[in-house]
Image (tube, rainbow, N blue to C red):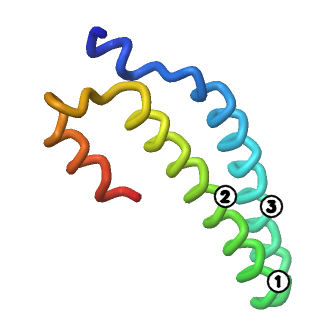
Amino acid sequence: MTDEDKGRHATHPAIVTRLRRYDGHLHSVIAMIEGGRSCLDVAQQLEAVEKAIASAKRELIHDHIDHCLDADTDREELKAISKYL
């Protein structure tokens, strides 16, 4: 597997779609703040965005571990990427 291939995962299109949706959600939260919505409403929506992004990150990392790392040769990379979980 080339370094370029390691950067492409079958799950990436779905993750990109999810992130674009979250991006739209984040823009809505910004509009809520600018519109004077209650801090409780804004905090709840920010929590939802934060959890959604964490979920996408976890999926990306798990996919990378499952499909791109060789247990014998990629120990350092596994250590490096696992700090983001």
Do tag 2 and tag 3 residues touch (Cβ < 8 Å)? no
Relative to 53, say whether 50 is above or below: below
Q: Give the amino acid at mark 1.
A: Asp
Q: Earlier in the sequence, mark 2 or mark 1?
A: 1
Q: Quadrant of the image for the N terminus?
A: top left
Residue corresponding to mark 3: 28
Q: CA distance from mark 2 to mark 3?
A: 15 Å
Three-letter code for the amino acid on which mark 2 is drawn: Ala
Instruction: Quadrant for residue 67, please give it.
Output: top left
Q: Is residue 45 above or below residue 23?
A: below
Q: Residue at x 66, y 58 (%)?
A: 52
State the residue in front, 2 or 32.
Answer: 2
**How many circles with numbers are drawn on the protein?**
3
Number of the front mark, 2 or 1: 2
Which comes before the other along the chain, label 1 or label 3?
Answer: 3
Q: Residue furthest front?
A: 72
Q: Name the element at disc 1.
A: helix
Q: Position of residue 55 (x, y in %)?
A: 60, 55
Compute the Cα span from label 1 to label 3.
Answer: 12 Å
The residue that label 2 is drawn on is 52
